Every structure is written in structure tokens, then in C-alpha cells.
Image (cartoon, rainbow, N blue to C red):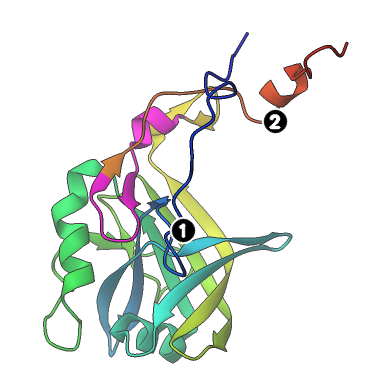
Amino acid sequence: MFHDIHTSIHMAKKDLGKCLPPLALPVCLVGSTVEGRPNFCTVAWFTMIDDEPPTIGLVMGKKRRTKDGIIENGTFSINIPDRGLAMKTDYCGLRSGRSVDKSDIFQVSYGKLATAPLIDDCPISIECRMANVIEMEGVDLVLGEIEAVHVEEGTMKKGKVDPSKIDPLLLWMPEGPYLSLGEKVADAYKIGKEYRKKGKD
């Protein structure tokens, strides 16, 4: 049985104020076609929004060149890099497509959405059709409906993706470092069923 070793430890917490919290977030490379060429940017602020239809959201800066391509074509890709792509992933976040050509950094292919470039080196690539762009004061929330999910066959085990074979790149917010996925802790949607309060049946 899984035991939470932290339940009996009570430590004082320090108030860090109104700031970005320390979080480990997965990193993705967002791809779009801009004026006929693939372009990519690095995004750590992304999450599932809905499951039917499957919809994903990306937080992007106002002047992202990749976002220009999303709006131009109404499509984009989300590519999940592994730890071996840390250097290229970081580069795509540091350099704007307005100043450098990022079309030859990765080997790309295309699926059903002909304008959403998929990175062949990434173990997971997701084709999305733009659903909406919600403008906020400093950033925009780009919503995309997922049209197809492409996964390397070698990462599959018994019909499911093995996270240890994906080895996704993580960013420790807000300033790094990059991390890799740790060992399995427990089975989600199962371990909680074993919880019992002290003195209760």
C-alpha cells in the first residue's frame, strides 16, 4: 500500500507574495506555417480545456511569430519534446521567428491539416485546428480543437503510451531548470480509494 510520508510533517510556509508559483510544467513546441515556412516557439503554459471535443489551450505572447501563422492558416501543432531536445527547445524559446529562420531546425512532416508542421523528432505530435483566440492584457489564450494525435510506435505498451519511454521535458517555473520525469509514484484515480482517516473504517 502506498503511504504518504509527508502527512505527519508540519513545516512553516513562507509567503512569496503575488508572483509566479514554483511549478513543474511540461514543455511543448508549438508549430505553425508562416508565409509558407514552418516556424516553432516554446510554450510551457498549456493545458487541456475540454474533452469533447478535445480542446487544448496555449498561453502565448502578443507578438509571437508562430501565432501569426496560427491566425493565418487556422491550424497549429503541439509537439512534446523529450530530454534529448532540450537545447533546440530552449533555442526556439529564446529566438524569435521574426529574426531567425527556424524552418530547418527540425525534420517535419504533415498530417491531415496540411499547414500544421509536425516535428518528427518529438515522440508526440498533436494536430490542432484553431477554435478561438482570447485576448488578454499581456498575453493571448489560443484554443485549438485536436484533430489528430501522433505517437511514436516504440513508446506504446499494451496499447497505451508508456511515459517512461516518452521522457517529456519539464520546466521548473518560473526560471528553470529543465527537468525530466521522475519515477512512478502511484496509480491515478486508484490510490485515493485506499485513503482512510485515522480512527475511521
Position of 41 relative to 2 (above/below): below
Compared with 173, 82 (above or below) is above
Looking at the image, which residue sits at the far right?
201
- Separation (CA) of disc 2 from disc 1: 25 Å
Residue labelled with disc 1: 126
**Picture coordinates of residue 192, whole percent (x, y):** 71, 25
Indicate the secondary structure of the residue bearing disc 1: strand
Report the amino acid beneath label 1. Answer: Ile
**Residue type at the position of mark 2:** Tyr
Q: Can residue 106 be seen in this snapshot?
A: no
- Whole-percent x, y for residue 162 in the image: 45, 29
Q: Is the residue 60 above or below the residue 22 in the image?
A: below
> As rendered, which of 176 and 188 lies closer to the eye?
176
Viewer-closest of 127 and 68: 68
| Residue at left offset 32%, top offset 52% | 171
Is residue 67 part of the magenta span, yes or no?
Answer: no
**Nearer the camera: disc 2 or disc 1:** 2
Badge 1 crowding class, 10 Å Cα cut-off, few under 14, some 14 to 19, many 20 or more, is many
Q: Which residue is mark 2?
A: 189
Is 131 on the left or on the right of 185, as rendered?
right
Taking the view exactly as shown, the residue that stands out farthest to the front is 12
Q: Is residue 82 left or right of residue 139?
A: left
Q: Is residue 109 above or below residue 96?
A: above
In magenta, the rendered stretch is 162-178
Q: Position of residue 135 (x, y in %)?
A: 53, 90
Dot label at residue 150: none
Q: If the image is split into quadrants, where does the N terminus sit?
A: top right
